[in-house]
Image (tube, rainbow, N blue to C red):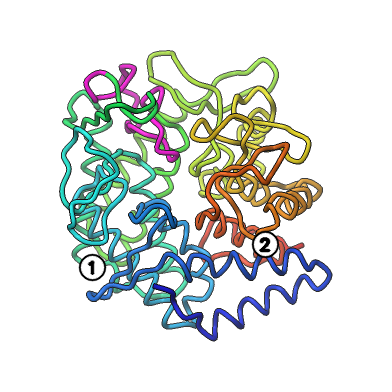
Amino acid sequence: MTQVITPAIKEFIEDVVDQFPHDKKIREMFKKTFVNTYETTIRSQTDGSTFVITGGDIPAMWLRDSAAQVRPYLLLADQDETIAKMIKGVIQKQFFFIQHDPYANAFNESANGKRFHDDQTKMTDWIWERKYEIDSLCYPIQLAYLYWKSTGDTSHFDETFSKAVKKILQVWTIEQNHEQSDYHFVRDHCPPQDTLSHDGFGGAPVGYTGMTWSGFRPSDDACQYGYLIPANMFAVVSLQQLIEIAEAVLQDITIAKGSKKLKEEIENGINTYGTIEHPDYGEIYVYETDGLGNYVLMDDANVPSLLSLPYLGYCALDDPIYLNTRRFILSEENPYYFEGKIAKGIGSPHTPDHYIWHIALAIQGLTSINEQEIQEMMELFKQTDAETNFMHEGFHVDDPTQFTRPWFSWANSMFSEFVLSRIGWYVPGSPLSKYRRGG
């Protein structure tokens, strides 16, 4: 179902590429990547909602990916009614799904019973996959908040939204004490990272920290330890957005108070358990911890990541602990940082060794305060698209023609955001919009 490109989108693209008159490659890449999500993944529903598939090989809608896929179109939402309706429809669909099951990460277009695998967990006909990830609940809040800031429209903050938000707060509160949770997930005949150990209730035991537990990372890989730091940081930002929504729009004291309490407890947990003193880099954030003294030092290409913290709005671009952490994760001490003949950057245990992700390159460029580094990212994009003018999931650092997925909508949207940042264009209300940096 191909969507017709609106006149506003065409005009927007021309306005952007005109800013790069001497860079034919960037012009060609932006023209293809910016419309990729709109042309290939949008499925308008009869009830006015919008279903967004994650990729050509996957018919399901991920809560995380769908929000990230449509995010750049927020720049058009105040001037293009079709775009505004489409994004509002995505929000409507996301909060319907969350109300249905806040533990699920991916859903079907209808209650057709399709699923990725016959997993041992509480499945329904709506659910494609039920891997519990904190960020699956953060992204829809972020999109709903940014849509409000971009358009001034508050009609999406309806009863479904309120009921779903209360479920989010309930789940995050329950998962502060994971032993009280009945969530479990077992997948048979799969790699270890695709299932939860201990009868599906999770791997290593955790102590109480105030943070909220996650079964899986934004890569859909199982957490090594239960408290995923960048996801908890994303939750802090989302809770602050909920406080503003509850006070300014919903006038809902229950949601406002619940959000404030959770935000304070999670943030205190991050401050207490989320950093270590590294002998070479100083105080840095860990990627995961169990609250019992164990932690893992790494970063993953998928967002939320430690690299993405200023993009998410958790800290400033020049925050000292963030900069220390950034130096660590952009070094070979991060087990998923790879350097090769053509490229260098952050990959993921989700993809093969020595494969780095275009999403991570976009985040690296968006969060850098070094102009030379930003320009290096621009050149890397041009050199690693395998002459397709599209972004991929992961690609080999020595040979970009070896890549996973012929096209990856989320990566194309992230590249679009990076290009837009070079001319000082940001999604209204987004954390980086206050910097207004142009190239």
The question of residue 210 being in magenta is answered with yes
Against 330, residue 157 (above or below) is below
Q: At 36% across and 52% down in the image, what residue appears?
A: 62
Q: At 42% across and 83% down in the image, what residue appears?
A: 81
Q: Give residue 158's mark.
A: 1
Against 9, residue 162 (above or below) is above
The kind of residue on which mark 1 rests is: Asp
Q: Quadrant of residue 216?
A: top left
The kind of residue on which mark 2 rests is: Val
Q: Nearer the viewer, residue 272 or 335?
A: 335
Left or right of 353: which side holds 238?
left
Q: Nearer the viewer, residue 43 or 67?
A: 43
Q: At 24% across and 25% down in the image, what residue appears?
A: 200
Residue 429, image x, y percentages: 51, 63
Q: Secondary structure at mark 1?
A: loop
Cα–Cα span, label 2 and label 1: 34 Å
Check the image and name the residue furthest to the right: 22
**Residue placed under numbered mark 2 in the picture:** 419
The question of residue 376 being in magenta is answered with no
Q: Quadrant of the N terminus?
A: bottom left
Q: Secondary structure at mark 2?
A: helix
Specify start and end residues of the magenta stretch as a single range: 198-226
Q: Please identify the dominant SS of the magenta region.
A: loop
Residue 30, image x, y percentages: 65, 66
Which callout, 2 or 1, points at the residue further toward the start of the chain?
A: 1
Residue 65, image x, y percentages: 43, 53
Residue 163, image x, y percentages: 18, 57
